[in-house]
Amino acid sequence: MPLSTSVQSVIKGLTLKQKIGQMVFPDLRFDDHAPKGREELPYIQGVIRDDEIGGICLFGGDIYETPAILNALQKQSRLPLLVACDVETGASFHIRGTTTLPSNMAVGATMSEEMARLKGLITARESRAVGINWGLVPVADVNNNPRNPVINTRSFGAEPGEAPGGGPSNVGSLVASYVRGLQDGGMIATLKHFPGHGDTDVDSHLGLPVVAHPRSRLDAVELAPFRQGIAAGAGAVMAAHIVLPSLDPTPDTPATFSAAVGRLLRDELGFGGLTVTDSMKMAAVAKMGSSGENAVRAFNAGYDLILDLPLADIPAAHAALAAAVARGAIDTARLDRAVERILRAKARLGLHRARLVSLDALPAVVGGRAHLAVAQQVSERAITLVKDAHDAVPLRTPRGGAVLYLSILDYPGGWYVAAPGRTLVPELRKRWANVTAIELSDRSTPAEIDLVRATASRYDAVVAGVYVRAASASGRMDLSPPLARLLQDLARVTGNGSRGPTPFVTIFFGNPYQATSVPELPTVLLTYDFYDLAERTAVRALAGEIPIRGRLPIPLPDLYPIGHGLMREAVAAAPQR
């Protein structure tokens, strides 16, 4: 049955089983964590045929295999499928070969609504080209807890209102601009993680966070970006697996299962689009009941879509929802309203007219120079010089001078793309011929660390690239104490040379709050990102080839406020390539 824009007529033709199928979304994984999507394809094809699911939640893939698989699945489905994906750094967050865009916090450091809009627009264009039509973005959380282990640079910043220093660096304005860009590019935008996951110190992938603020504070801070995103026309809102006692006093009831939070979204904020759960596999809720029980609880809390269920649990969740309807635990009118919203979302995307994508058109849309130029512009405008005690940036060390580069990692595993420094070291060597590069991590021995400490004074300049992640489900977000002490010692050694201070520049990749753990550092640059583009940008800033204009979108507690940033003009040309 083709999806007509006359949604009501389609709903009248659906059985109860088909209606329930529209609400449950399994995961399909081709990522590095679970590269078994190809093995599961026959099974998911059976789920599409037998349970008539409304869509899938995609993890991983590449620019040619993914659209081919999605086209095949779309052909098999009676109604077109919504294909949801976390595309937080562009489609490249999961799809290899697409343009990697800087983090939201990097966009926050540019203080540019236009950069936020362009990030959304490029994300949508490349995602739609590979068959993804529903973006599980943007993160609308205000990251006001430096110890937040799961949001961090995924947020645009820490200020829901106007930031000191001028410019719209507040989260709400950037969220709204991103939403407009994404939906102008033909995707559904999803505000997450409602009502606000920014002030937590527990990762909901691992446990159940509690946000204990009163309603007045939630209105002023956490809810502000969601209001602006809704006003901008966001098509969906995702619930967080967090407990908010001021909204729902029922013990241990996350927003995902809270009818009070659902009413806040629908009745008070006036949101009329799709409501969706966060992944139902996350530990915060998975341990509370079976997939079927949790699906019923989430639906009755007001959520239209049950997202990222284990593929094997789809039949059980389907059966549990049907049983709840049969015994009167689910209101059939509410069920029809949910299905209507889902079908209207598909119609707005034009899926009833064209659900397939053209593989021949991919090269003209995905990964081109124009999109890369925007990514580069954001990266360059974001880099933030927060401290430069000895005026070391731009680095004036002669081309023949000896430079010690230290790549300092939180831990060496799980980088996936490549080891940190793979771009930074060659870029340094294009500008300074005599670079000694050393990698250290929590696995480095005391002897290795002592050797660096003892020899650092022999160099004309020391540059440290510090790579610290706040990664979902990792449970980690700090440097090991021996490495922090090494940085402290290097700050002292380089500051007390017989010929004056030796330039010592520390560049933080990823978690910017890590800079507060070593306040003694003389020169600090923040990139808010990892990998090639951020590394190349950092070296260009260090060499004085680009101006430095970024401002802090967050405070660095006890050091610098939101809006702080030292300005530098470009003083040098890039080396010939």
Image (cartoon, rainbow, N blue to C red):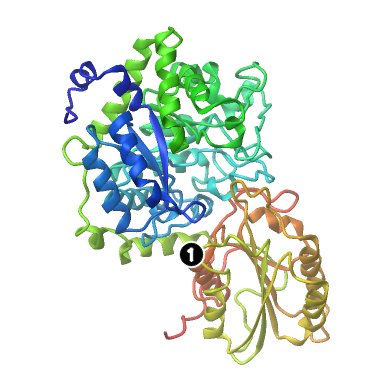
Of 83 and 521, nearer the camera is 83
Residue 180 appears in the figure: no
Of 56 and 420, nearer the camera is 56
Residue labelled with disc 1? 380
**Picture residue at 46% right of the left edge, 80% below the top:** 574
Residue 549 as seen in the image, left or right of residue 7: right
Reply above or below: 238 against 108.
above
Residue 323: x, y in percent? 43, 14
* Residue type at numbered disc 1: Glu
Residue 376 appears in the figure: yes
Reply above or below: 466 against 69.
below
Of 266 and 301, nearer the camera is 301
**Picture residue at 35% right of the left edge, 46% below the top:** 41
Looking at the rendered structure, the secondary structure element under dot 1 is helix
Image quadrant containing the N terminus: top left
Residue 428: x, y in percent? 56, 80
Residue 390: x, y in percent? 72, 73
